[in-house]
Image (cartoon, rainbow, N blue to C red):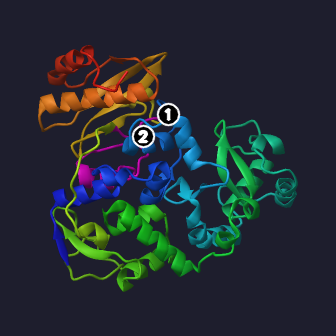
Amino acid sequence: MTDLTADEARRIILRAQGFLGAGSRSGGVRGMLRRVGAVQLDTISVLARSHELVAYARLGPIGRASAERAYWHDPAQAFEYWCHAACILPLEHWPLYGFRRRAYRDRRYRWHEVPPTVDKILDQVRQDGPITTTDIGGAKNGGPWWDWSDAKISIEYLLDIGEVVCTRRVGWRRVYDLAERAVPGDLLSGDLPDADGVTALTSIAGRSLGVATRADLVDFTRVKGRYADLLDEALRSGAAGLVPVHVSGWPAPRARRGPAGDGTANAWADPAALESEPRGRHRTTLLSPFDSLIWERARAERVFGLSHRLEAYVPKHKRVHGYFAMPVLAGGRLIGRVDPAREGSTLVARQVGFEPGGSRAGAVEAMRTALWEAASWVGCTSVRVERVTSPEHEAPLRAALAAEPPDGSA
C-alpha cells in the first residue's frame, strides 16, 4: 500500500483535475470533459454559466462560443444526465448509465408522479423532434419553479429512462430528441449490466479525482443502496482499477460494511496517478462553486482547508462570502474568494477575501492575475473592487489593480 502526505495527495488531485502541468490541457474542452468525467450544470450565471467556468478554469480564456460548440455539437459529443448532479457527460459514457435509467423506469417517479401524457409526449418528440418544452406547451403550471406542467414532467421522465436525450441547449432550454436519433447505435444498444456500469463509473470517478475517499467516490457517482454495495465490491475486488492508499491527516474510514483494507488505508487512488510526481505550472484562476475540484464541501476542506458553501440561496443578510463566491486557486492552493458581478464593461468584485497563511504579496498578485484574466475573458476592460474583508490586503490589492493589467488581459 502507498503512503501519501496530504500535500502529495493534493498535487495528484490537481493534476488529475487538469490544474497542474501543460499536458492536462490537451484536447481542448472535449479532452477536459473526458478527463474530469462529468461537468456539473447550474442555472446561475454571474460571469458565465458554471460549465463554461469549469472549462475556462482549466484551459484559460478560450472562446465561450467554441466551448459551447465543444460540449454540444451536431453530431452530439456529449449528453446531459444524472451523475454527481445534473451533468454534461461524454457521449461514450451512455452505456454506463443503464443501471440508473432502469431504476428510474422501475420506480416511475422521481420528483413527480408520471402523468398519463407521457406516451403522447414521446410520440410528439418522435414526430416533431428535436423540441423544447415550449414546443410541448411550456414547462410550468404557473406556481413555484417546481410546479411543473404535465408535459415537462413527461419529457423529463423520458430523459430519465433514456427514451429521449438532451445533447444541446438553446437559450438555456434543453433540446430533446429521441435517443435513437441522437445516440450512435453501438452506444444505444450497449447498456451495461448494473454491476459493470457502477464499476466503470467508479473507475472514472477515481481517475478524475486522483485520490479519493469512499465517500468522495459515492458523491461523484451518487449511488446508494444496492448500487453503493456494487461500488464497494468494485473497490474490494479491484475491478474498478483503484488501489488503497493512506493519506496522512485524512480521517480514518468509518467502521462499516465497505471495502476491506489493511486497517490503515483511508483512500483510493488511480494507480497511474501514483507512477510519477506531479510537475509543471499551476493554474491561477477563479473557480465555479460547482467545479469538481471543490463541489463536495467535506473534500474541499480536507484537501484545501477551505470551508466552502454556496450562498446564493442564503438570505442576503446572512451571507458571509457573497452570492456566488468563487474560490481563487493559485500555486495549487485556495488563497481567497471573490464574489463577482458585471456592470457593463466592468468586472465588479463585490467582496474579496483572503485565506490566512502564505505570502501577502503573493496572494495579492495571484488575486490581481485571476481578476484581470477573468475580466478579459468575459469582455470587460476594467476591474473594480467594492469590499476587501482583510484590512492588511486591501491597500496592496487596490494598488495592484490600479496598475497596468497583466500581459494579455484587458
For label 1, count other residues whose C-alpha is less than 10 Å away and answer few (under 14), some (14-19) or many (20+).
some
The residue under the point 65% across, 47% down is 168
Seen from the viewer's position, the closer of residues 101 and 243 is: 243
Which quadrant does the N terminus fall into? bottom left
Marks 1 & 2, CB-CB < 8 Å contact: yes
Residue type, label 1: Ala
Residue 334 lies, in percent from the top left, at 25, 42
Q: Quadrant of residue 265?
A: bottom left
Which numbered disc, 1 or 2, marks the residue that appears first in the sequence?
A: 1
Residue at disc 2, secondary structure:
helix
Q: x, y (%) of residue 339? A: 37, 29
Decide which of 144, 266 is in the foreground and name it. 266
Q: Quadrant of residue 3?
A: bottom left
Which residue is at a point 86% across and 50% down the rendered structure image? 128
Residue sitting at x 26%, y 30%: 367
Question: Quick check: can you spot residue 138?
Answer: no
Q: What residue span does the magenta drawing correspond to?
A: 286-312
Q: Is residue 215 magenta?
A: no
Residue 95 point in image, percent of width and height: 60, 71
Q: State which quarter of the image contains the C terminus.
A: top left
Which secondary structure is most common in the magenta stretch?
loop
Cα–Cα gap, marks 1 and 2: 10 Å
Query: Looking at the rendered structure, which numbered label has been put on residue 48?
Result: 1
As drawn, 72 above or below 221: above
In the rendered structure, which amino acid carries the disc numbered 2?
A: Tyr
Q: Residue 199 vs residue 187: left or right?
A: left
Q: Nearer the viewer, mark 1 or mark 2?
A: 2
Mark 2 sits on what residue? 56
